[in-house]
Image (cartoon, grey):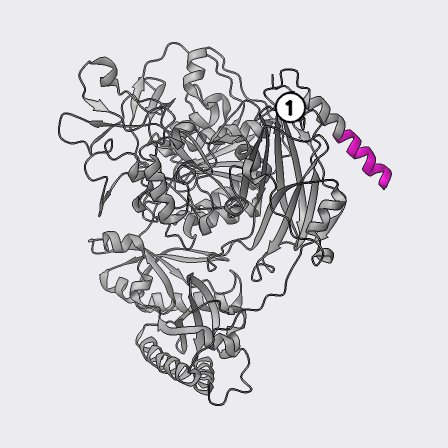
Amino acid sequence: MADFEHLRIERAPFENDRRTREYKIPRHPRGDLRGHGQRLADALNNSFQNAQQQLTSRPGNFVLKILYTGLLDINHLHKHGVEFVSHEDNQLCVVFANESGLAKFADHLQKLGIDDAELTYKQILEAIEGIDNWTAEDRTSWAITQFGLPQEESFILDIELWPVNVARHPDRLTICEAFERWLAETQIQRVDKINLDSLLMYRLRVNVNQAGMLLNHGDVRLADLPPKSGIQYSQLHCDIENLPENIPHPPANAARICILDSGITGNHPLIAPAMAESADFIGGDGSDLNGHGTAVAGIALYGDLESCKASDYWRPELLLFNGRVLNEHAEFDVKTIEKTLVEAVTYFVEEHQCRIFNLSLGNANAPYDGRHVRGIAYVLDKLARDFNVLFVVSTGNFNGSNNPEVPKYSWRDEYPEYLLAEQSVLIDPAPALNVITVGSLAKHNATFDAQRYPEIAQLAPANENQPSPFTRHGPSVKGAIKPDLIATGGNFASTMRTGREYDAVMKGMGVLTCNSRFVGNTIFTEMSGVSFAAPFETHLAGRLLNNYPRASANLLRALLVNHANLPNEVETSFSEEMKATYKAACGRDAGRDIAGYGAVDENELFRSSENVVVLMAEDKIDNNAHHFFELPLPPEFLRTQRAAREIRVTLAYCPAVRTTRLDYVATKIHFRLVKGESLEAVQRHFNHETQGETDTRNDDATGNRDITAELRSKGTVQSSTWRMKQRNPNEKWFVVVTRQDRDWGEALSLEQEDYALVVTVTDRENEHALLYTQISQLIDLQIRARARAE
């Protein structure tokens, strides 16, 4: 029985400098350097002439596209007269230049191979492959390409400008002032504006001609259609007997969770006891005119309402806060959703100390393109770091594609192939790295009609614990595992006798939750959609915070992921041929891209037992440093007798981010699990002073590990499990945590960055295990030994 509080561990009282090597960007030699310089000079001249034809709000300033080969020393581009602005793709960056800078750039190119003896950073010019313009095509978003501009006489566009420097920098303010003067001169109506360090966006009302002007404007990075929520769900009432009277209120010190959605019906009899505060950020009183927010709130408050209803046990443990950010159609308001979210989160953190936020929304107009994280995702990543809060978001629903047709004929017959299609990638904000992103599992597979009638009328694509047919797939930035987790979100069925198998029927296959229109109706309703998978994790995070009220957002993320397992039903949903084809195409595992680390097992999530012990640590680490944790593993756990045992290690951190960099995160923190005779022996492999004497270590026992160090370290929450049958009682195991900042990220990062580490030690096959008792004793011995050493 799990009834022991998780244990805290501390790192060894020293840290080593990370091993480094002097890295010089390799040259890309050109056979004909003079010809190369002349070709680039001609390209620069053509690009300059084209740039002069583009509109501008700052005459004499130009944007250029630099294509390069190999590696480009972007930190010293200014030596040749141009300023780096953004990495837009592999081998492509964007630079700013004024007329004097362009003249300097042209002069240096002309000197290549002729008079370049005193030319510094010549390797930069050698690496450049071509020079071009940022064109209207580059500025056209995926949504405009897919759907075209709206047909109305006037319509809304979201316009991103190049985010030069940071929000309050004088150069940024100059760009804003000049652009706003240009808007006034061209009679373009400004609806809203958001200015963050790595996002500068205007929401504008325009006509077709004005849209064309913006697509040809030099300061514009991207033109996009406004967000489209894409929330779709099926609603069906469920019968209910009488609820118990006097449902208790949560305690005053209960964890505070905030639902940012379409509002909440606060007088619902199951929600009212936990309802704390409502605020409306789009004009209104916070009430739910749609039903989506109330449905999400019911799951966030109670988790599995089917189980609660079956046992007639209703005891809310969390305080519920309501932030209305979606309108009566569960869509974003005309005000920029990014700015609305900043206002809402700031309010609920500063005024009500909310620590956990649920956002079951997605921008169907912004599928992740594999390059930049932007929009809502960037805002959430920044807010998570600024306020030390946990965001739980959904992958977004996949509702099929018309161009191309995915699926072509039948949701059932083509399942699960379309789950891995290019059209079913994550949508904003799901790619965010500092949040928990949740995909969806099916639970029920029979519609109400299938339960009532013997005829074969409707058949579901997915069975219990298989991926829902509407869930979306990862990965995120640079291959980071996303979604992080997966939870029950519902299912639907295809109609089999009408010849319309593309149609979806959801009745009877969703998630039980609270009905916002309960007056004169039923208390419950049933919903299907990824929106209703996310609040399951919000519920678990809130209960964790009740148990460990000092836990950081990093620790909450690490605990959730540490207890996740990839369901076998997800793995077996894909044929071996399909998995092999997918891996050959992208080098990734199909199950991981759909389900991430898996579904959370609640058994030892909140409390440890004598068979399963959870160890926790929170610390701060300097750049280019190593931290060492000696795991307190008793000899009985490391016994030579064959028996299944596990060590599971999870790390979470919350780095600064930058949308103009393909790397996105300013710092990398990762871990290795290694074994050795002693801490002294192990640390020599992670010591700058001994890098000429010993090899650097990777994970040990890699044959017993499920996720590689390379794959897990791409994300900001990282986890691997080691499953072992036989060990040596004399060996010692260590977790080594390492931090390495990007060259460009040092200025954005703190001197010491926070991280959380969770280790779960499992010995289920030992009927007489006293693992918790033994580990507790070893931790006490470690503490005493360190005290004596001091």
Q: Is residue 44 magenta?
A: no
Q: Nearer the viewer, residue 299 or 403?
A: 403
Picture residue at 49% right of the left edge, 13% below the top = 246
In magenta stretch: residue 786: yes
Q: Position of residue 134 (x, y in %)?
A: 35, 68
Q: Please say whether residue 352 is visible from this viewpoint.
A: no
Dividing the image into 4 quarters, which one contains the N terminus? Answer: top right
Q: Give the side of residue 128 with respect to residue 529, left or right.
A: right
Amino acid residing under circle 1: Gln
The image quadrant where one finds the C terminus is: top right
Looking at the image, residue 726 sits to the left or right of residue 184; the answer is: right
Q: Residues within 10 Å of mark 1 (few under 14, many from 20)?
A: few
What stretch of residues is rendered in magenta? 779-790
* Residue 404 vs residue 415, the one in the foreground: 415
Q: Is residue 484 visible?
A: yes
Q: Which percent across, then down, holds residue 306?
A: 41, 18
Q: Position of residue 197 (x, y in %)?
A: 51, 58
411 w.r.t. 744: above or below: above
Quarter of the rendering containing residue 350:
top right
Q: Quadrant of residue 699?
A: top right
Please give the residue where the numbered disc 1 appears in the rendered image. 641
The image position of residue 492, as x and y in percent, is 28, 28
Q: At 27% across and 62% down in the image, what residue appears?
A: 211
Q: Residue furthest bottom?
A: 115
Choose between 71 and 664: the one closer to the eye. Answer: 71
Q: Main secondary structure of the magenta part?
A: helix
Q: Is residue 672 above or below residue 615?
A: below
The relative height of residue 308 versus residue 672 in the rendered view (above or below) is above
Q: Is residue 757 above or below residue 4?
A: below
Label 1 SS: loop
Locate residue 198 relative to residue 216 in the image: left or right: right
